[in-house]
Image (cartoon, rainbow, N blue to C red):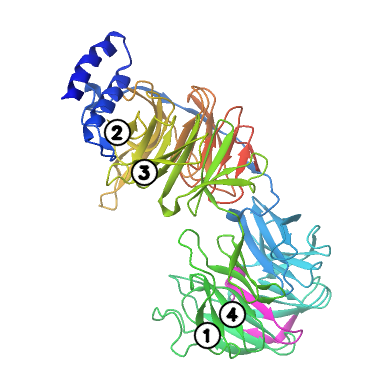
Amino acid sequence: MLVSKLIRSVLPRLTKNRLPSIVIVAIVIGALSLSSCGSVTAKVSTTSLPHLKSPGPVTTQINIKLSMSTPASFSPGPSPNVIGTGPTYISPSGFVVAVDTSGNKSNIYERSRPTAQWMQLGTVPGIVAQLDFATQKLGFALVQGSSGQSSSLLYATTNGGRNWSLISTGQLTQVHFFDGLNGVAAAPAPSGAIHGTEMLLTSDGGHSWTQVTSSSFPQQGVYGIRYSSFSFISRQVGWFIFGSQPGTGMQQKWLFKTSDGGKSWNQASVSPPFPSPTTTTAPSGGLPIMGYVQQIRFSSSSVGYLLLARGPRGGALKTVDGGLHWAVVPLLPGNEMSSTAITDLAPSTPYGAVAYTVSGMLWNQPKGGSWVQLYPPYRAIDVSHGAGRTIVLTAQGRLLQISSKASASFVTLGNFGVNGVGASVVPGATVMLTTSNIEVMKSSSKLWSKQPLPKGWNILSGRFATSKIGALVLSPPGPSVEATLNGGESWMKIPLSFTAFSVDPLSATNWWVAGGISHPLVPNPYNKHILVWKYYLYHTTNAGRTWSQFGASWPGTGNLNGVQFISSSVGYAWNDNTIFVTTSGGKTFTGHKFSAYYIPGPNSLAVGSNGRAWLASDSYPVFETKDYGSNWAPM
């Protein structure tokens, strides 16, 4: 009763003063929330302006003038970017070498011991597919050939990776060097990569190779560099494993052993033929058909570990009888945020066991201790910038404010676990979206205040312009966005004539939306219900009364994942592997394709002034551009 009187007395004054209608609605909604008898649950507004009862029409259609510029360039940082991590090498003595692939070059990094800091060394032209080091100074790198099935270039370093020289060309699939001169390699037999494998020996550092005639495997072909591995425990005793062409999670595997430095080889174990019943291991406990060969590492004549892609997560297969029988053993702790599938393992070093995972994480288990993740300090999935601050949401749900000088320096603002959705830096505060709440931390405080979201909401994306003004897209996406003018105490559903995927509110009435329209496939030879999407940018300056539609044939993956404008003229749109930048309010865009990194979500890019933007590529470190996306460097 009191609330209704308040509305009747205040509304004429607001109208007389010609306040924007959407502000009037916000005040009315705020007044209505007083009648909830103390409830803190957000309410979906049942009161909407007449123009919000149906979608606002598209009154202007603009064909964007879109031009593609040079691909975005990424400078290497002081540590490998986990999203671009290539092959690694963990020495029995404890030093670690990693490859960061960027474009058509491979940056080499080293840790002198697992707990040391990364040091950037040299660069190898091309895509390095395998690393092998005889000592900390003497190393070799196989560069993947154009076919992808074998390598054609062998590089060597004599100063620990700072400089590399081309040693030989040839179709090598895996190498192992005992010292700077002597080594063994596997290569496709002359009849073809799929139909045979032969062993080669070198005594001049890889400049020339001699075939070991007694070590040819006629009907067993190494299918690519990534599906084979050597492991030697001495100059004489070693193993070689390789797999067939993989498919549906299965791969036939062969394990051979040598006791004379690679001059002769005897089969130690073989998996069931492909295809076979989908069992984890062979009935006899031998090599499994499931999983793809990653690496084999023996620590003694009897104990060895086999790492498999699509194998045991965070674990390995272990043998205690020299490779005859194998059983799954867990190693790394489970992590639901990032994959802990192991790609490289040194079970025994002076510093304990050391492991590298497919997601770029370096782990160490000191002798007698538990596994500890050493690198990276975090993986950023979302980024936001404002008021001179840059914050990231990590894959583990931590919200961090990172230093403008180095992304390795950060302050933890909160830990939201699996509930974290995205964050916005706004004037005087940080706004965090979770699966169930809007949480706000003022700049002068270290405490978070919560405003519950309506029950049943599943947020796809969202952003706040201030601590009060925000907009969300719900999942599954549909023809509407949800808007609030009071920090989530109440919400208005804004109907649309298109499907929204990402929304960027610059103010209470000025919004950009990345969206699209679907229509049936024509012609449709499949005789099935198939929808084809056309993606657009949409802009309103009157809270959805009317819209302008900006259309283009978007290069890259063809869709649009996100949009953010920093002013009326400067904004970015993006899909998985391309950014589009406008300085003309959307009339013209310049595109930059990403060759090595990607933009995973609607909040993975943050836009600043003067050509600056920040990228969180589900990776570490965070990258920054100062020239509208042409060049990127790690923070």
Q: Is residue 168 above or below residue 495?
A: below
Q: Earlier in the sequence, mark 4 or mark 3?
A: 4
Residue 268 visible in rendering: yes
Residue at horizontal 59 percent and vertical 51 percent from the top: 620
Check disc 4 and report the residue beneath it. 305
Image quadrant where one finds the C terminus: top right
Residue 231 part of the magenta-drawn span: yes
Q: Earlier in the sequence, mark 2 or mark 4?
A: 4
Q: Earlier in the sequence, mark 1 or mark 3?
A: 1
Find out whether the residues at labels 2 and 1 contact each other: C-beta distance under 8 Å: no
Q: With 132 as the anchor, is 622 left or right in this view?
A: left
Check disc 2 and report the residue beneath it. 491
- Element at badge 3? strand
Mark 3 Cα within 10 Å, few/some/many (few <14, many 20+)?
many
Residue bounds of the magenta highlight: 211-237
Mark 1 Cα within 10 Å, few/some/many (few <14, many 20+)?
many
> Which of the labelled discs sits on residue 437, or is there none?
3
Q: Nearer the viewer, residue 246 or 338?
A: 338
State the image coordinates of residue 566 (x, y, percent, origin top left): 51, 27
Q: In the picture, residue 140 is in which quadrant?
A: bottom right
Q: Label 1 to label 4, Cα distance in Å?
A: 9 Å
Image quadrant where one finds the N terminus: top left
Residue at horizontal 68 percent and vertical 71 percent from the top: 172
> Which of the labelled discs sits on residue 326, or is there none?
1
Q: Earlier in the sequence, mark 3 or mark 2?
A: 3
Q: Label 2 to label 1, Cα distance in Å?
A: 58 Å
Q: Label 4 to label 3, Cα distance in Å?
A: 45 Å
